[in-house]
Image (cartoon, helix red, strand yellow):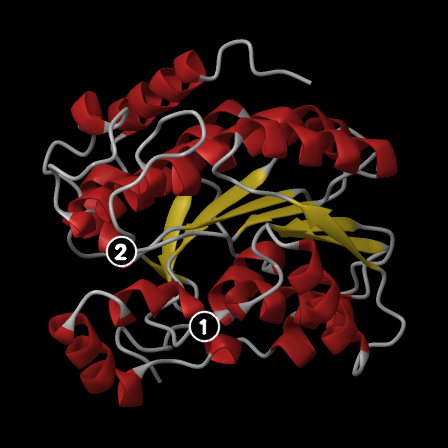
């Protein structure tokens, strides 16, 4: 049980992940933490036709796949090199995916960074916002035609997009979206404000995508507070950061528990498209959620991002 604990609906991956026979799945950040657990559980219990494991480092992806195959030897898992801080890498990954699959049933936008030092992506966006939101938005934009084509098949497949956000969205600016520093390294803005805005943008993207594409079920999910490598930057942030980790460690959920909410969102028939969920399957509440359900703000962030990505095609 973690901070913001794992409560809500009962969800046992072994019992509650249905057959995914014939389906194709893509998980970003699939080589570690929540992503790796999600890939392993979907492969073990759902047995889809293929899972693409998005990862920046091909060697780490291959090692993660080998580890999963030790217990799920028949899993068809394909590494997909993907650096969400680079448009060229994202476009290359999308091209590779589309050359190998004509369908996509579950897109799990799991990858993310948190509490990183000031920095910028290859295209000059603040590193957390550029990676967590802009990169995932571009990937989704490029794969949206195949998602929609899959949903339009005669058998009417249940197509899902699961977007990992965080209760940390509550640390975003009160306006929800301040674009004034997004083309800088962000050093003039608090680290957690930058992180919060990136995670609020994730939730808003999910909401607007659900509105624009009613044939696709879209959910934004908070995994709880989980013991993964996402918190590694805190170890480098001085005595205070290390103290926070030390005090929180006994209360952090395991990756196996932390992945349940995103797995639930990927397969449950009780998901309401466009909603934000806390673990497990609980409609989100708390600071930031009013902005996360602001349809006008969702439209504004979507249109701003689309404008930034104009001309980014494959």
Counting from the top left corner in percent of width and height, residue 248 is at: 23, 82
Residue name at image x 23 percent, y 47 percent: 196
Looking at the image, residue 114 lies above or below residue 256: above
Counting residues from the start of the chain, the first of labels 1 and 2 encountered is 2
Badge 1 local density, few (<14 within 10 Å), some, or many (20+)? many
Looking at the image, residue 8 lies above or below residue 299: below
Looking at the image, residue 14 lies above or below residue 260: below
Residue name at image x 70 percent, y 61 percent: 59
Q: Secondary structure at mark 1?
A: helix
Residue nearer the viewer, 46 or 168:
168
Counting from the top left corner in percent of width and height, residue 102 is at: 84, 33
Counting from the top left corner in percent of width and height, residue 150 is at: 76, 34
Badge 2 local density, few (<14 within 10 Å), some, or many (20+)? many
Residue name at image x 39 percent, y 46 percent: 275
* Quadrant including the N terminus: bottom left
Residue 293 found in image quarter: top left
Residue 304 found in image quarter: top left
Depth check, mark 1 against mark 2: the one in front is: 2
The answer to whether any part of residue 225 appears in the image is yes
Residue nearer the viewer, 60 or 102:
60
The answer to whether any part of residue 154 appears in the image is no
Q: Secondary structure at mark 2?
A: loop
Residue furthest to the bottom in view is 250
Label ID, residue 142: none
Residue indicated by mark 2: 115
Residue name at image x 20 percent, y 65 percent: 237
Residue indicated by mark 1: 258
Residue 156 found in image quarter: top right
* Quadrant including the C terminus: top right
Classify residue 300 as left or right of residue 123: left
Question: What distance separates the C-alpha of mark 1 from that of mark 2?
Answer: 19 Å
Classify residue 12 as left or right of residue 59: left
């Amino acid at each position: 049980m973690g901070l913001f604990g794992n409560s809500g609906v009962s969800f046992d991956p072994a019992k509650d992940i249905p057959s995914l026979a014939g389906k194709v799945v893509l998980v970003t950040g699939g080589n570690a933490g929540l992503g790796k657990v999600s890939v392993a559980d979907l492969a073990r219990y759902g047995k889809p036709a293929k899972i693409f494991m998005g990862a920046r480092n091909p060697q780490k992806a291959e090692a993660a796949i080998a580890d999963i195959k030790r217990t799920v030897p028949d899993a068809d898992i394909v590494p997909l090199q993907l650096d969400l801080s680079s448009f060229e890498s994202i476009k290359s990954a999308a091209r590779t995916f589309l050359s190998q699959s004509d369908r996509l049933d579950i897109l799990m936008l799991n990858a993310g960074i948190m509490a990183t030092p000031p920095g910028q992506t290859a295209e000059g966006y603040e590193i957390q916002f550029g990676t967590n939101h802009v990169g995932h938005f571009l990937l989704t934009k490029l794969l949206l035609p195949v998602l929609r084509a899959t949903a339009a098949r005669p058998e009417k497949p249940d197509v899902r997009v699961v977007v990992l956000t965080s209760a940390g969205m509550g640390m975003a600016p009160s306006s929800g979206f301040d674009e004034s520093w997004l083309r800088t390294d962000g050093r003039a803005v608090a680290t957690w404000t930058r992180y919060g805005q990136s995670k609020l943008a994730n939730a808003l993207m999910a909401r607007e995508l659900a509105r624009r594409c009613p044939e696709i079920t879209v959910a934004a999910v908070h995994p709880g507070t989980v013991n993964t490598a996402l918190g590694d930057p805190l170890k480098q942030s001085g005595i205070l950061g290390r103290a926070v980790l030390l005090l929180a460690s006994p209360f952090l959920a395991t990756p196996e528990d932390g992945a349940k909410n995103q797995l639930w969102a990927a397969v449950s028939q009780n998901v309401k498209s466009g909603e934000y969920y806390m673990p497990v399957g609980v409609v989100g509440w708390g600071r930031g959620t009013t902005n996360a359900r602001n349809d006008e703000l969702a439209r504004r962030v979507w249109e701003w991002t689309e404008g930034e990505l104009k001309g980014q095609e494959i």
